[in-house]
Image: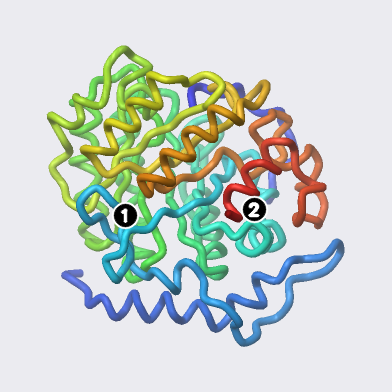
Amino acid sequence: MYQRPTPPTGPTPTAGRRRFTRKALLAASALGVVTALLAPVRAGAAPAPAAAPTAATPLAVNGQLRVCGRQLCNASGQAVALNGMSTHGTQWYAQCVTDGSLNALATDWRADVLRVSTYVQEGGYETDPAGFTARAQKFIDAAHARGMYAVIDWHMLTPGDPNANLARAKTFFTAMAKKYKDHPGVLYEIANEPSGVSWSAIKSYSEQIIPVIRAQDPDAVVLVGTRAWSSFGVSEGSNESEVVNNPVRASNIMYTFHFYAASHREEYLNSLDRASDRLPVFVTEFGTQNYAGEGANDFAMSQRYLDLMKRKKISWTNWNYSDDHRSGAVFKTGTCNGSNWTGTGVLKEAGVWIRERIRQ
């Protein structure tokens, strides 16, 4: 959630209003290839060729999402809660996002959504805008091919003021919205974890970025980061009232909340509870460890959060789908160098726990 230590260095893998029917058709068309792509990959086996589908996918069932009241709703207006995983930074762990790993996520884990995290700094987007845009699109397309939604995460972290990357964000989201303007399977997360900056500054940034997305893609849900590492301000001595009393001037948006259960206790849980009574909330990142994604897992506190989110139909993605050495990475170190992704044998303790919650 907060500033995570840089992972160890390793090998780097090389207009106008649309008719809804366009997106609905695209969602349904994914079924023509999804079943074979989703087949779990055995060690040493290549993904199977396309075949006739045997089951519907989250994307095909739910279609274009939208915000209705305080809920995320599907194309039929029914409240839905997406559960899934977030990638690590793709400048470090792109090798963990493969055909095999995504097949496992979609079928073995039964995830609804993949959050694709494009770091802005720390060796990320700013070093190669075109390359990191293409990499994110590759992973988003792969999620869609498997019937999952994709959260396009603009992973600004340091500096904590999203306005510092305003021009880059406009370029990135223009490219993304142009590509996915007719696809029902994307949500745009425009500022990962603002910190050391006022809510008014975050609101101003959001009201400049959202029109950039809406100019291309007026239908998709936009996810707005909140103050103090997306804690609704709690980590900097505030609370959700600053957002409740001064919301972003835009429709079809949700506000993000992040927590790490071993560090973030009653005050954070209570803020999420209160905020979700007043605002549409999407938990785009959480962990069962401390705020650095390290240390012992607190599954009891984590379950309290998950029970609250289930009761209130709050969507979530867990940090993170990689084999980083920290306890918050779900795969055992070295897994991403192999070809076996399914079952619990390749997972750390946190991975076993979160896989089971997603499967439920």
Which residue has dot 2 on it?
Answer: 97
- Does residue 169 appear left or right of residue 148 in this picture? left
Which part of the image, by quadrant, shows the C terminus? Answer: bottom right
Q: In the current view of this chain or complex, which residue is farthest to the top?
A: 237
**For numbered disc 2, what is the local secondary structure?**
loop
Which residue has dot 1 on it?
Answer: 72
- Does residue 158 appear left or right of residue 203 in this picture? right
- Give the Cα distance between marks 1 and 2: 26 Å
**For numbered disc 1, what is the local secondary structure?**
strand
| Residue drawn 60% across the image and 40% down it | 320
The image shows residue 71 at horizontal and vertical percentages of 28, 51
| Residue drawn 38% across the image and 19% down it | 267
- Residue type marked 2: Val
Q: From the viewer's perspective, is residue 299 above or below residue 282? A: above
| Residue drawn 68% across the image and 49% down it | 96
The image shows residue 108 at horizontal and vertical percentages of 68, 60
- Residue type marked 1: Leu
Q: Nearer the viewer, residue 146 or 351?
A: 351
Q: Nearer the viewer, mark 1 or mark 2?
A: 1
